[in-house]
Amino acid sequence: MMTANETALAYWTAAEARDWAGFAALLAENVVYELPQTRERIRGRDAYLRFNIEYPADWHAKVERVVGDGRHAATWTRFTVDAAEQDALSFFEFDADGLISRITDFWPEPYEPPAGREHLVERY
């Protein structure tokens, strides 16, 4: 089993490579993904995988720092989205099998979510 740091780094490596099978293999079946700034929540591996596959912009991620211990990890990631750079903080929780069970992403500014993903998210 990978450490929390290794799993968080593998998550971003798979996402950047668009290795969706490898990405999905890191997620618990009942993973919950939350974006507090847009008040969006996605429940379940399949919906979260589709959310990432269907994201409507060209983006790239570079991990600046990863810290973790036990069943928790956090990453500071620099994103390039359609040529604009922005940073994000992601907090990961892991289940007893070492799979990612919860992800909470924080972006630098509040924003309204892009259209077209309403079928995957619930707003809170």
Image (spheres, helix red, strand yellow):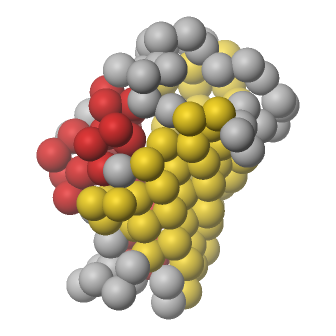
Q: Residue furthest right?
A: 109
Q: Quadrant of the N terminus?
A: bottom left
Q: Give percent across and percent down for residue 95.
A: 39, 79
In this rendering, the count of numbered labels is: 0
As displayed, is residue 7 above or below residue 38?
Answer: below
Which residue is drawn at the image coordinates 42% and 22% (left, top)?
A: 119
Which residue is drawn at the image coordinates 73% and 19% (left, top)?
A: 112
Q: Give percent across and percent down for residue 81.
A: 57, 19
As displayed, is residue 83 above or below residue 19?
Answer: above
As displayed, is residue 23 above or below residue 115?
Answer: below
Q: Residue furthest left?
A: 21
Q: Give percent across and percent down for residue 38.
A: 72, 32
Residue 46 in view, yes or no: yes
Residue 75 in view, yes or no: no
* Front in this rendered view, residue 104 or 60: 104
Q: Give percent across and percent down for residue 77.
A: 60, 47
Which residue is drawn at the image coordinates 55% and 78% (left, top)?
A: 72
Which residue is drawn at the image coordinates 50% and 63% (left, top)?
A: 102
103 with respect to 94 (left or right): right
Q: Quadrant of the C terminus?
A: top right
As displayed, is residue 23 above or below residue 57?
Answer: below
